[in-house]
Structures are given as structure tokens and as C-alpha cells.
Amino acid sequence: MIVGNVLNLSSISKIAQKTGSSFKGGYSKLPNIRLGEKAFTTATKIGQFISNPVGNRLVLAGTGILLQPTIDYYNKKVDRKTREVSAVRTASKIIAGTGVGLVVRGGCMALADKIKYVPEFLKDNPDKIKNYKIALSTIAAMAVMTITNFLLDAPLTTKLSNKWLEKREQKEQKEVK
């Protein structure tokens, strides 16, 4: 809520409290789920995988490669050739970006594990040391990826797209003959 040029924080705070209260009340209505030991172990492994940076990226890439090229291919607002090229380029971007991203992220995580320096206030807490190394590797990966996006992702996307489209044209020419 803005009154004049002044932000009314008490109104925003009240909205946030009401929203939080409605969620809290809704959680009490959810059914209790009881898992056996095997199901619990499986659910825990899946949770650890998708919350891991590499696993998270693979899950996002998997859904992206299944959905986005399909959406591009069935876009009826453009002609068939444009749809095909768009779908191929999108799939190539996802493959190239995921491949390079996984290598960079994995390399940065491996380097962060080798770092011996840990701030003094973290030395007694293994969980915080782990979080420190993850944060450090994330920052390093973001810095490296700003460079690799131009040096590796873009050329790799172009090469993949061109190869894919070239094979598609060769297939079409064989069908015409």
C-alpha cells in the first residue's frame, strides 16, 4: 500500500500475517501420511537428489527438454519450417546449457571441497561448513558461467542446431527423391 510517496509497511505486514494464518490453518487439514522404512528411504533419496544443485539442474533440464520444444513445435501461429527450427534451437540450447552448466557446477563444487580455509566462526559446525562450501561453489559457478555462456554455450548450441537441421534436411531430400 502506497500513500503518497510513503510506503505503508503496517498494511503490508497485516496482509502477510493474514496470508500466513490462512496457510497455517490449511496445513492442519492435510492427511497424515505414514511411510514404511523402504518408502521413507526412497523419498529421502529423491529429496536429496532434487535439492542437490546438480540434481536440481537435471530435473529442470529434463522437464525443459520434454516440454519447451514440444510447445515450439506445435505453435500454429508460425509456419512449419519455423516451428521445426525453433524446436531444434530450443532443444539445442537446453542440451548445451545443461551440459556446460553441469560441468562448470561440478568443477566448482569439487574445487570448493578442496579449499582448506574456513572462517574461524564456522570451524565447530560441520553443517555450516558444508553450507559455506556450497555457497562458495555457487558464487564461483555463477562467475564462471557468465564467461562460458558466450565461449561455450552459444557456439555449442549453434553447432548442435546446425547438425540437427542438416540431418533433417538430408532426410527430407531423401523422402522427396
Image (spheres, rainbow, N blue to C red):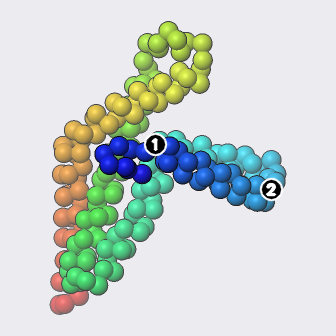
- When asked about the image quadrant of residue 144, the answer is top left
Q: Which residue lies furthest to the bottom in this view?
A: 177
Residue 154 shown left or right of residue 112 in the figure:
left
The quarter holding residue 109 reads top left
- Determine whether the residue tagged by mark 2 lies in a helix, strand or loop: loop
Q: Which residue corresponds to the image point at 49% horizontal and 47% vertical from the top-left?
A: 12
Q: Answer whether residue 168 is visible to the viewer in this image.
A: no
The local crowd at label 1, few if under 14, some if 14 to 19, many if 20 or more residues have their Cα within 10 Å, is: few
**Image mark count:** 2
User: Which of the numbered marks, if any, corresponds to residue 9?
Assistant: 1
* Position in image of residue 2 (x %, y %): 37, 50
Q: For the C terminus, which image quadrant? A: bottom left
**Outermost front residue:** 4
- Residue at 30% of width from left, 53% of height from top? 96
Q: Picture coordinates of residue 61 (x, y %)?
A: 41, 56
Residue 123 visible? The answer is yes
Relative to residue 86, is residue 41 depicted above or below?
Answer: above
Q: Which residue is drawn at 76% across and 60% down?
A: 29
- The residue lying at 59 percent from left, 47 percent from top is 17
Q: Which residue is label 2 attached to?
A: 32
Question: Horizontal and vertical percent for residue 127?
Answer: 59, 24
| Residues at marks 2 and 1 touching, judged by CB atoms closer than 8 Å | no
Q: How much space separates mark 2 and mark 1, taking CA atoms?
A: 37 Å
User: Tag 1, which secondary structure?
Assistant: helix
Quadrant of the image occupied by residue 161:
bottom left
Viewer-side label of 2, 1? 1
